[in-house]
Every structure is written in C-alpha cells, then in structure tokens.
Image (cartoon, rainbow, N blue to C red):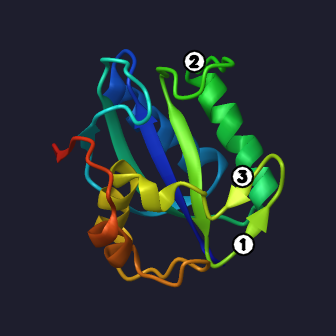
Amino acid sequence: MPLVYLSLGSNLGDRKKYINDAEILIEKIIGTITSKSGLYETEPWRTNHPELFLNEVLSVESNFGPFQILEKIQSIEKMLGRIRTDQNYAPRTIDIDILFIGNLILKDENLEIPHPHIRERRFVLEPLSEIAAGFIHPIINKTIKELLSNCIDKHFVRKIS
C-alpha cells in the first residue's frame, strides 16, 4: 500500500484546531496517519492576504484510490467549514492537498498527482522534508531534500512546534 502524503493548511479562525480536527477526520475517513511534521507558520502564497497560515504534512496509509481520497478530502474540508469560491488562494478554514500517492503519476482535469506546485512551495517542502527527505519525486527524479535546497520561494516559513 503506497503512502499518501497530504499537506494541510489553515489561515482562518482557530487554525490549530482546524488542523487537529482535520487529522482526526483523516484518520477516521481516509486511513492511518503514519507520520506528521511539526506545525509551520507561513506567509500566504501568491496572495496579499494578511492572515498567516499554519501548515503541516502527513503521511497516511489508505486503501482508497486517488479519486476516492480526493472526494473524502473535499468532504472533510466541507465538514470543517471550508467555503470554496472562484478566488484562488483565498483564506480558508482548512485546505488539504494530495502531494503524492506513492510513485503514482496522474493527470486529470480534476486531479494531478504529484501535486504540480510542490517544487515551488517552501511551505510544503519544509514540513515534507521533515518526514520524507529521501522520498524521490517520481517526475522530477530528485529527493524532497534536493527540491527544498533548490527552492527559490522566499516566503516566510517558521516551524512553531
């Protein structure tokens, strides 16, 4: 069973509670969390919103396929009060992204795995490197540690726990 790597982020309300509640629901609905990074406080990416994010990355053992996982993630986001708008990168109670599902490569109009922006996002690479530094990106063929060392994203990322 390949590990599923998920990125969690919140920048509205009680950010830590939303992250914790998402973890509980992921375990209940998607699968067993096998590892998780610390929490990172980060600047919003590609937006000027003043609210800082809390981010973390999880690895999860799941028996579900990619589209089932996506459906379950969207259900969890909705349960936690996420309201989807036409605005990309809007503030949100919770955001859960699929980063990797093992070495799966999938490109669909509704889902792309690996996540297409991993190498551009320090707020993903730092926590991911904490739990999977040696994982090799199946398209780029570089480790997460290498991607982090080559990342040109200059947004503020600070580990807080």
Residue 70 image point, x, y percent: 72, 47
Asked if the residue at tag 2 contacts the one at tag 3, i.e. Cβ–Cβ closer than 8 Å, the answer is: no
Residue 2 lies in quadrant = bottom right
Inter-mark Cα distance, 1 to 2: 30 Å
Q: Percent x, y for residue 56? A: 36, 48
Which of disc 2 and disc 3 is earlier in sequence?
Answer: 3
Q: In the image, 76: left or right of 105? A: left
> x, y percentage for residue 80?
55, 23
Q: Residue at x 52, y 21 (%)?
A: 90
Specify which label sits upstream in the sequence, 1 or 3: 3
Vertical arrangement, residue 71 with respect to residue 79, above or below: below
Q: Judge by depth and name the residue closer to the eye, 57 or 43.
A: 43
Q: Amino acid at mark 2?
A: Gly
Residue 69 - label = 3
Kindly identify which residue carries mark 2.
Answer: 81
Q: Which mark is residue 105?
A: 1
Quick one: label 2, few (<14), some, or many (20+) residues within 10 Å?
few
Q: Looking at the picture, how far across and down is residue 19, in whole percent?
A: 40, 36
Residue 60 quadrant: bottom right
Q: Nearer the viewer, mark 1 or mark 2?
A: 1
**Secondary structure category for the residue under label 1:** loop
